[in-house]
Amino acid sequence: MSRSLIIGLYLTAFFITLAAVSLVWTPYDIQSLDIPNKLHRPDGTHLLGTDHFGRDILSMIMMGARTSIAVAVVAVGIGMALGVPLGLLAAARRGSLLDEIIMRGNDLVFAFPSLVIAILITAVFGASAVNAIIAIGIFNVPVFARLTRGAALPLWERDFILAARVCGKSAFRISCEHILPNITNLMIVQGTIQFSLGILAEAALSYIGLGAQPPTASWGRMLADAQTLVSIAPHTALIPGFAIVLTVLGLNLLGDGLRDWLDPRIRVVRT
Amino acid sequence: MIRYVTSRLASLIISLLVASIVIFAVIEVIPGDPASFMLGVNARPDTLAALRSEMGLDQPLIQRYFAWVTGLLQGDFGNSWTYKTPVADLINDRIWVSLPLAVYALVLSTLIAFPAGIYAASRRGSAGDVTIMGATQLGVAIPNFWFAMILVLIFAINLRWFSAGGFPGWDNPALALKSLTLPAISLALPQAAILARVMRSSLLDMLTEDFIRTARAKGLSHRQALWRHAVRNALIPVLTIIGLQFSFLLAGGIIIEQVFFLPGLGRLIFQSISARDLIVVESVVMLLVFTVIVVNFLVDMAYAIVDPRLRTKT
């Protein structure tokens, strides 16, 4: 295993553990405000200090990890659940009108910058974590659809597929039994990358107020709150940022490491 | 070549058409009708009726769609309900912040990424390569708005080299550029990290090609083979990413404008969302998507110029 895989695993495991622990325990209750103790620098009582309401930043980071991971996991899930079948279908019916429609549809979704999709959705349905998930998820669909189709097309030319066809298997069965297992590694690697992009997107949406709403803790919201305080209490801006960078870095290293470990020929898409 | 251009042109027009239908439809699915959404539950009936007729909600859907599209084509984006001015004027005021910001960031990103990517590829495995690749890993992981806050903390608050935000207008171009510098850097750096990685891997692919070996066998130095043959061919995937990045920079600008209080399209969208001014939201979103689609079309055209092989394909 490569160094990047190990570092990536540790970082990712660390933040997943933080999120998991926050389900049962946080050092302080983030719902209770403690205004007299606001904007404390990190010390023995508050390991990472307190914010402008006197809330414990470590506890907020733990709860925020939960939000980030939940949003990103569901968004990647939506992207895979819709994108992979679409890509398989397009590859199975390659060159047909259906293929053309699916791919043009993908191009169209791609033409909407993810943030613009999110803005449109929140403008119409209101800002919430659920709408943020939908917006990020929609953008993941063409990523997986394109990747699946691109990886499936050369497989369809292979001899073992021909053998399966000679056996009388339908295109549907071939897609499920032969194509899908052969692209799983690719999906795992790309899924890790989309996971990290989802965390960045959630942070960005929450930062501009279109994502998780208070009292839900979110790294992006913490940064938005910290913006006006950056000169008097820099730790309120630095800590959530480091949390985002370390998580995303961990996932990217994990993705790269997994690729080298599973199949170095895999090409991931990153934009 | 003509077939290539016509097929691209056709797909450009279809994309624009479908995009406009999607945006129009999303605004239409709002519970109730757009007018009552904009005015809220406590609106007076006569105000509601006035807005309805101004927005043409008494007309059939299809007719309204065509009125909107023909308006857009003639540069008439409708009138903003909150600002009481034509949306075209609002956009015109703000696009001269957003567009220069995106272009500035794109130029910076390219200027950083090209040398970094080419250097890393030509010295593969060296300390320089490892350092550059490590830096790009970090660059990809940093959210641009957080990077922007850090830049403000260092260069505006502590060193006082730049102002923390705001835009003085283009009367003094030097001052205007200066106020766009921190926003452009924060937008450009994460993009430069991606671009440098693409440049490096694309160039590494090229360096293993037979034609590079041929060029070397003919007596060209490593440097000559790199610059005359490899870099030019490696540019093709890089161009795609640059085209895609432009749309990310335009949309990413929406957030960065919030950090630096820049009066661009991004702030216009946010102010319009909180004011529930759907006429503005609809038109600005359409304008952004239009720009992205057209830029991608231009990238396709640029391919044909860079790589003559693509002209024969349809």
Image (spheres, coloured by chain):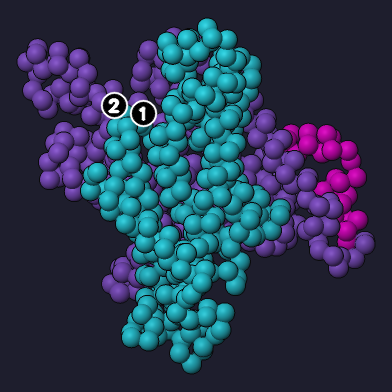
B267 over B214 or under it: above or below: below
Secondary structure under the numbered disc 1 in the rendered image? helix
**In the image, farthest residue toward the front:** A167
What's the mark number on residue B237? Answer: 1
Residue, disc 2: B234
Q: Position of residue B47 (x, y in %)?
A: 88, 61
Q: Is residue B107 visible?
A: no
Residue beneath the point at 72% across and 59% down: B276
Identified at 33% across, 84% down, the residue is A43
Instruction: Tell me, yes or no, whether the two marked residues, 1 and 2, touch with CB atoms within 8 Å.
Output: yes
Query: Hue of chain A?
Result: cyan
- In the picture, one chain is purple; tell me its letter: B
Crowding near pointer 2: few (<14 within 10 Å), some, many (20+)? Answer: many
Residue A95 in view of the camera: yes
Q: Position of residue A155 (x, y in %)?
A: 44, 18
**Mark 1–mark 2 distance (CA, rounded to whole Å):** 7 Å
Residue A243, compared with residue A163, is above or below; it is below
Residue B91 within the magenta-colored segment of the rendering: no
Q: Answer with the quarter of the image where residue B306 lies.
A: top left
Q: Which residues are magenta?
A: B47-71
Front one among A13 and B8: A13
